[in-house]
Amino acid sequence: MKYKFPHYLFIAPLAIALSCGGTKNTGISSAKEEKLPIDRKVDSVLALMTLEEKAGQMNQYNGFWEVTGPAPKDGAAALKYDHLKKGWVGSMLNVKGVKDVRALQKIAVEETRLHIPLIFGFDVIHGYKTISPIPLAEAASWDLEAMQHSAEIAAAEAAASGLNWTFAPMVDVSRDARWGRVMEGAGEDPYLNSRIAEARVKGFQGNLGEFSVAACVKHFAGYSFAEAGRDYNTVDISDNTLHNIILPPFKAASEAGALTFMNSFNELEGIPATGNAYLQRDILKDKWNFKGFVVSDWGSMGEMISHGYAKDMKEAAMKAANAGSDMDMESYGFVTHLAALVREGKVSEANVNDAVRRILRVKFMMGLFDDPYKYCNEAREQQTIGKKEFHDGVLDVAKKSIVLLKNEKNLLPLKKDGQKIAVIGALANDKTSPLGSWRIAAADGTAVSVLEGLKKYTGNTLTYAKGADVAVGTIAFGSETHINMTDKSGFAEAVTAAKSADVIIMVLGEHGLQTGEGRSRADLSLPGVQQELLETVYKANPNIVLVLNNGRPLTIPWAAKNIPAILEGWQLGTEAGNAIAQVLYGDYNPSGKLPMSFPKSIGQVPLYYNHKSTGRPGNGQPTESVFWSHYIDIDNAPLYPFGYGLSYSKFEYSNLKMSSNSFSKDGKITVSVDVKNISGVEGKEVVQLYLQDLVASVTRPVRELKGFELTAIRAGQSKTVTFTIDEKLIEFYTANKKFEAEPGDFKLWIGGDSNTTMEASFTYTN
Ligand code: BGC
């Protein structure tokens, strides 16, 4: 059916004298430009809207109705249906598939008074049907192109399924591995998070064509700093941490053109993010000149009542609207109260107009006014989802995400024939857990298991023994629920398999739904009896390659000491088993580096490399005094540091050179290093640059990542890698409450992880 232009697009723009920012390509956060036609169209629609319809645009509902069934007659679904027909719904989430999207869109554009199309959102976090590695795993690739491509694949499949908006990327800098949502972001570093945020935004949004979806940068802001790593818990952070650590990736994503932001469940300075004008208005919309819209997190407007920040939903709606929340996800706050609040003078209509403009502008940019059925093409849906090239794409990024943590006794890569291999662990034979959390459109059982991946190599003999299940605490949903598993009845079979094997591959870790929202853990060791299984098998035969499948850093000090080879295999998505097998057999040389520090003990958490010095840093070694910042029962160092990861190649760093050891305002210096592959195999290395600002108006971290380059180096060859250091790179949020570079002395390190000792120094003057 052909969509006809509604009449409002032909009326002359009415004189609504509200400011409209410019738009540019895919970005709408660009600085002041002259008013573009899109803004005139937006104004012409806005001019026709009643207050109720405006509040309706600011209302988002979860899918409420099986569209193939009869129209809902009672309860919440009937109310939503009624609102939809009245034009009181601006967006829906969790509706997918062309058929359903088309049916709902048809109501919006054919049955409502103004025919304004809906925008359809969905959590396409790491793939739609063809699943990429979890975002934390992808971050370990440090491969921005691969991550952008992975987002492109996700966007193409989602868009083919009728969707036009993903609630990703999550750019929350995460320092606390107890928090289940660390799996959804890019780890503990603001610089790495920023570069990845840009890549993901570009990947999702592309050219805003029919294979693109609008990005939603979340959760704005501070959500990952929930106390004790407990999801939704209180957040209490300094302005310094907010500006220097938490906000940079959000700013980078906004500058990369992200069309929308999502606020968050947490409070900041005692004000819930949804009602926080400092974040949403002062910083995002005023300072950063962001022109897109902000959607609340699920029900977060209503949650301001539980926070003790609003007495009822009406007050919550007022506070949210006044603070710059533009769309209400599932609180019913705006749709129920906003029009009255405007009439009572508690929310200005200008505020409402601004929010509606932002929403309409995104709909225009996504092409939904030109053709509300732009994303509703059954043939494209059929041809696009699950394409072979998408499987190749997610396999590629999955291999790149794997981190080799330890490799002794030359256990890896595996020999391709004549070996007896025992494969042990429930996760080895699991076709669901590799999909990880947040893969709502992918069916259970659609991942390639490690066992299946290994079976493709036919030169060795394989025996499989489960050993033990993965224990999971109480989980809210998911098809597999193993509560407090203590069953060791499979140990004997595992020991027998181990005894007659040359090499044992043990696949241990977390269930796919053991991380993600609401999945905080108070213990970061291998769940259930898996540690005991590992030690039991080790006694029978120590030739073990431990393959970890997990969604967060784990505490595995015993394994790190005793097990000769350890591969971090995360939850790598649809092609997980193929990726892991290819790395185990050396058909792919691992190059991943950890985006989060691995603690030795839960007591060290939150643990991150870019910490402050403190007044009593010590030197990391035992001393006679106890009066320095340390534990008396464990040292401060992580088990594996940020940026760490091995390869089947060996790299040697030398010849650190600087163009000068000082620079001044508007100047720059370059620093270079030679990296030689001293092994017999070609490999890739992530060369990392860290800086420390020694004395500043506010204390600075002991080191901070400020550049990286992923480079392939042939066996025996050497490459020179160069970084440029300028004022922009050393800027931070100073005691003057603004970003600036302060004159002073700096230290610099280059190497293959955050512990590197190859050091130089420079001075910045102005
Ligand atoms: C999560 C968001 C998500 C939203 C919609 C919330 O519970 O915090 O990240 O996008 O639900 O599913």
Image (cartoon, rainbow, N blue to C red):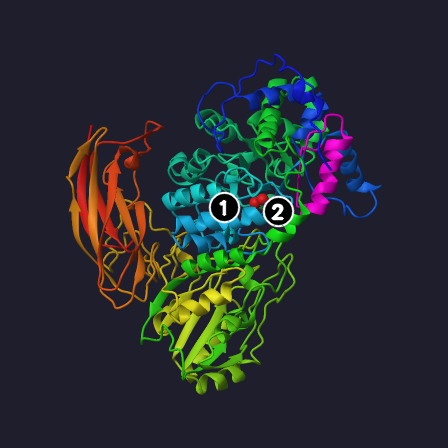
Location of mark 1 (residue): 226
Q: Nearer the viewer, residue 307 or 638?
A: 638
Residue 112 part of the magenta segment: yes
Q: Quadrant of the N terminus?
A: top right
Secondary structure beneath dot 2 equals helix
Q: First in sequence: mark 1 or mark 2?
A: 2
Circle 2: residue type: Ala
Describe residue 443's horizontal placement relative to residue 641 as left or right.
right
User: 524 above or below 355?
Assistant: below
Foreground of the two, 56 or 670 = 670
Q: State the residue at coordinates (61%, 22%).
A: 41
- Mark 1 residue's CB less than 8 Å from ligand 1: no
Q: Quadrant of the C terminus?
A: top left
Q: Which residues are magenta?
A: 89-117
Q: Report the image quarter containing ligand 1.
A: top right
Within-10-Å neighbours for mark 1: few <14, some 14–19, many 20+ = many
Question: What residue lies at 67% left-to-right and 25% top-to-bottom?
Answer: 54
**Residue on which disc 2 sits:** 160
Q: Rounded to the nearest whole Å, what is the CA distance between mark 1 and mark 2?
A: 36 Å
Q: Nearer the viewer, residue 498 or 391?
A: 391
